[in-house]
Amino acid sequence: MNTNPKKILVTGVAGFLGSNLLSKLLLEGHNVVGIDNLSMGSLKNIEIHLSHENFVFLENDILDKSAIDALDTDFDVIIHLAAYKIPRYGKAVDTLRINSKGCENMLEFARSISCKFVLASTSDVYGMSNDLPFVEDGNCVMGDSKVPRWAYAVSKLYDEHLALAYMEAYNFPVVMLRFFGSYGPNQHLSWWGGPQSVFIDCILNNKDIPIHGDGLQTRTFTFVDDTVAGIYAAAIKPEANGEVFNIGADQEITILELANTIKRIADVPTDSKITLIPYDQISVGRKYQDVMRRVPDTTKAQRILGVKEKTSLEDGLRQTFEWQKNISLEKSN
């Protein structure tokens, strides 16, 4: 347990990363106030902690300035996880508005109390860059503005610039974290949660596994415990202040290999078959762009934060499959 407990504000606390981070923060003896409007998060994710003496949950919206102004003023760290994700099938307005205005509201609050600010960003900000592996000071190359998927990347890149501008203008520390394919218990059970969520659901329900394109696009997937270790180190270590970090694993795998791996490790009988869906059928009437390779350079996180992937992809997928299977059984009963 940490011998120097801090008071930490976590936005998006009932979501996937927020709920897993909450468990870590409480285990380490910190005092946590969590905010979530429960639009994507769930009280079920944090129900075991609702009565914890060091945790206060507030069902508030980060777009509600009056709710933010009513918060305590003695926080040591703000960890801003709340966001609206990839608008692949629409809702780009929500993505741009919530991510930009929500981040601005939280940065303004951090400025008012001179509090360290940790921003959850995304590997999406590297966009179409061909400079692999992605390094934190590399170029961010956005695709066509008429492709809806880039709204999320642009919103998070804007948040990074805004955070850095606030740090320079108002002299309080910020840290930016670019996550690569985090997965595990409490993940959202749709494309919001990543392809592994959908693939596991298909296997459990004997549905065909949909893969966009030819399935040869590659990603890296990071078990949530390893992602949380990165967030925690960034929040606690002063050496992280002012820096951008890739937080992720570096085992590159094709989406087709991912689907086959999950099928192989599944401990249930399944008739699920892999179905390839051409890109022009994903966003009908709209242009679609995919990122063919996405892999991080994690040496900076290892050197400064002292974190490195500990959970192998296969072990993490086994744990995640078991969790999702149990969730499925609960829903069916």
Image (cartoon, rainbow, N blue to C red):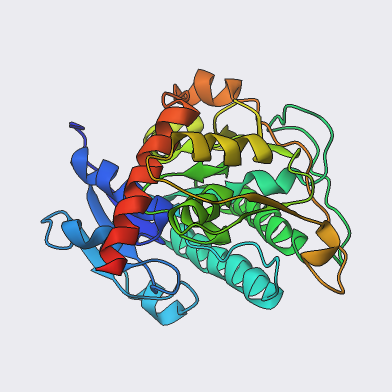
Q: Is residue 255 above or below residue 89?
A: above
Rendered residue at 58%/37% (across/down):
260
Q: Position of residue 243 (x, y in %)?
A: 58, 35
User: How many marks are shown on the rendered structure?
Assistant: 0
Residue 174 in sight: no
Q: Is residue 225 left or right of residue 208?
A: left
Residue closest to the eye, 272 or 124: 272
Q: Position of residue 19 (x, y in %)?
A: 33, 54
Rendered residue at 43%/75% (across/down):
61
Q: Is residue 272 left or right of residue 213?
A: left
Q: Position of residue 30 (x, y in %)?
A: 22, 45
Rendered residue at 54%/59% (across/down):
207
Q: Is residue 33 above or below residue 232?
A: below
Q: Quadrant of the C terminus?
A: bottom left
Q: Is residue 120 above or below residue 332?
A: above
Rendered residue at 79%/68% (across/down):
283
Q: Is residue 105 above or below residue 150?
A: below
Residue closest to the eye, 277 or 285: 277
Q: Which quadrant holds residue 219?
A: top right
Residue closest to the eye, 237 or 183: 183
Q: Is residue 145 left or right of residue 264?
A: right
Q: Which quadrant holds residue 284?
A: bottom right
Residue 255 in sight: yes
Q: Position of residue 37 (x, y in %)?
A: 39, 74
Q: Quadrant of the N terminus?
A: top left
